[in-house]
Amino acid sequence: MSTLPKKRLLKALNKEQLDRPPFWLMRQAGRYLPEYRATRANAGSFLDLCYNPALAEEVTLQPLRRYDFDAAILFADILLIPDALGQPLAYKEGEGPVLDPIRSAKELTSLSMDKLHDRLNPVYETVNRLSSSLPSHVTLIGFAGAPWTVASYMIEGKGSKDYAEIKKWAYSDPEGFQKLMDILVQSTIEYLLKQVEAGAETVQIFDTWAGVLPDDMFRKWVIAPTRQIVDGLRAVHPDLPIIGFPKGIAGNLLEFVKGTGVTAVSLDTSTPLEWAVENIQPHVVVQGNLDPIMVVAGGQAMVDRVHEILETLSNGPHIFNLGHGIIPQTPPENVALLAETIHAWKK
Ligand code: CP3
């Protein structure tokens, strides 16, 4: 017999009517918090922090001690999968992630799924710890990157402005590129299943660079692999709520929702609210979409926009969030005002 979910985020994912939407923020643990910077400095490298269950648990909990979020997101990174597949990864101060790029199907022999779970085991341990340390009203969110976005870092070797290397490979050698996508789909399914087994109650799939493809390629390299992941997870957990975040895909959003089977979709900042009410909310739960820079600005402008988002999306299922991750320059007191504004709002 199944029991009804009691947590606000799970209720929203179940499309139940609520007096106010649940809220959490993408990248809610991170450099805008002095306590994060202190733990990070003690951990050694960013990867040491991700692979240390006690410290990863600690930084996941830090924002919840300050703000009454309805969810905690596992502290890890989308690039732990390439790392665990054997592609050396480093995070350089001020530069972001740097990898030894893979540029052709021949080079795929350097990747192996054999040690995937050995390497990722500390992440499952972090989830396990959080599932007992979180307050009972807080939902635990697991996550992974979508294959397209993870592949972009594996092939470009770092963040990119034009995605020329990944596109060149995907357009000129689709069969070879598919082999890399297959490895990522399979690894991601296994990785997320282990997170769920360890206690994650929902998972979010981050596809930050979904918006750089023309629509035929978008179907092939964004929708299809995401659908495979959704199906792979649901084959084991038919009721698992899954949140997609295909950033920057504008008019392709409805096709994404229908094509992937996600439970909820996270809207980026540029998605028009009224359009989402008419076209997306009838099909799935929507999450979003305050501009992260509004939280840097703070004050009445932020409060007004928060009210506008809350009112506009309040007649259908909604999870309040940002349109992209919170940025390091964000004053923590502005996040406090944001939390207060949402908690004080009533439908
Ligand atoms: O609080 C949380 O949301 C959980 C942890 C989390 C991190 N990264 C921690 C992190 C999550 C969910 C991510 C997702 C992620 N990682 C994405 C998708 C979401 C997005 O923001 O677009 C992407 C593209 C990455 C890859 C990545 N990791 C980049 C490009 C960078 C460098 C840029 C940056 O923001 O620093 C990282 C590093 C990273 N991941 C940090 C954190 C807290 C900063 C590292 C540090 O402390 O030095």
Image (cartoon, rainbow, N blue to C red):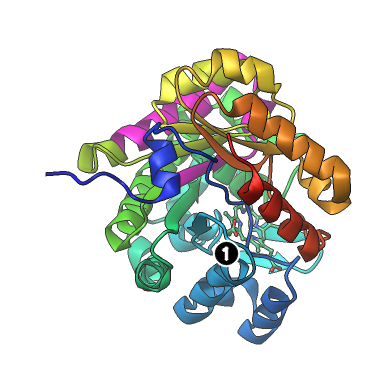
Image height of 173 relative to 18, above or below = above
Viewport quadrant of the C terminus: top right
**Along the line of sight, the residue nearer the viewer: 48 or 40:** 40
Image height of 20 relative to 173, above or below = below
Q: Amino acid at mark 1?
A: Pro
Whole-percent x, y for residue 204 in the image: 48, 45
Q: Residue at x 57, y 66 (%)?
A: 64
Q: Quadrant of residue 49?
A: bottom right
Q: Residue at x 54, y 27 (%)?
A: 173
In this image, 46 relative to 222: left or right? Answer: right
Magenta residues span 203-232
- Circle 1: element type: loop
Whole-percent x, y for residue 135 in the image: 43, 67
Q: Residue at x 54, y 41 (%)?
A: 20
**Along the line of sight, the residue nearer the viewer: 2 or 291:** 2
Q: Residue at x 63, y 37 (%)?
A: 288
In this image, 204 relative to 42: left or right? Answer: left
Asked if residue 222 lies in the magenta stretch, the reply is: yes
